[in-house]
Image (spheres, rainbow, N blue to C red):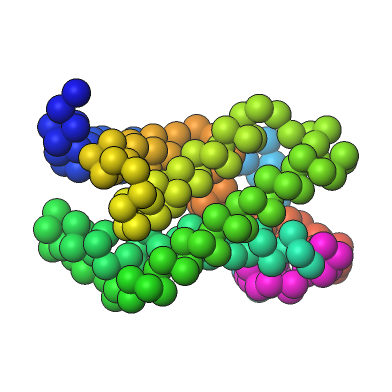
Amino acid sequence: MNWESLYDFLLSRGTWIAFGVCIVGLCFRCIYLYALSLDRDRVFYNHFSVSWALKSIFAWLVPLGSRGWRQQPLFSLAFFFFHLTFILVPLFLNAHNILWENAWGVSLPSLNDTVADWLTVVFIVSALVLLGRRILRPEVRFLTTWWDYTLLLLCSLPFITGFMAYHRIGPYGPVMVLHLLSAEVLLAIIPFTKLAHVVLYFFTRAFIGAEMGARRGARCW
């Protein structure tokens, strides 16, 4: 198999396709859900409160900032670092920034390679904690499907393969192809899976915060 040709395709057209599907899909899903809310729960907008919405969003973004987080501190910290590193490493990795600049002429501040490497380790450990929780906690295992495990694996594969490529573990060509392929598949399925919460989280927390706060005067965190 010509790994180099496959790598070039994934790095060029494959990347554009994955980003296109992700962005367009998320836009359509947000528009659809907004239209659905107008049809099913229009009265909500009569008492929507920006302040209560923002309080709800930020309370759940801060580690241990909500009562739910404080009741499960280990899981909460693993959950927080999982999401934080999931954002920081892909966006600010130096090698990725070189690709951003070559493709779009945009470059973000770059992480030191050693720092990015350690953040990758933090992500993998956090993912293992979340996996262990799904397996060991009966109430969580009961609600977990094979697709939940698949999504966790798909989220982890770009980090695992990126770590392997950086440290030259395994055949470099196939590892890099798997790194790109897993990242692009992950991007493409975001709008159609639970991973859409990367955007929908803000709408959900805002809705719950305004519903509980503006209508009932109660905190939801």
Compared to 39, does 208 lie above or below?
Answer: below
Q: Nearer the viewer, residue 169 or 40?
A: 169
Residue 81 seen = yes
Percent across and percent down for residue 31 are: 47, 40
Classify the position of the C terminus by image quarter: bottom right
Q: How many marks?
A: 0
Q: Position of residue 108 (x, y in %)?
A: 27, 71
Give the residue at x 26% y 44%: 172
Position of residue 115 in the picture relative to residue 14 (left or right) = right
Quadrant placement of the N terminus: top left
66 falls in the magenta region: yes
Image height of 50 relative to 90, above or below: below
Left or right, 55 with respect to 195, comes to: right
Q: Position of residue 160 (x, y in %)?
A: 45, 49
- Residue at horizontal 39 percent and vertical 46 percent from the top: 161
Q: Is residue 47 left or right of residue 20?
A: right
Question: Is 135 rendered above or below residue 75?
Answer: above
The front one of 55 and 62 is 62
Identify the residue shown where x is 34% and y is 67%.
Answer: 92
Magenta run includes residue 67: yes
Q: Quadrant of residue 195?
A: top right
State the residue at coordinates (41%, 74%): 115
**Residue 145 found in image quarter:** top right
Q: Which residues are magenta?
A: 52-72
Front one among 142 and 153: 153
User: Is residue 33 at least partly visible in the picture?
Assistant: no
- Corner quadrant of residue 69: bottom right
**Most common SS among magenta residues:** helix
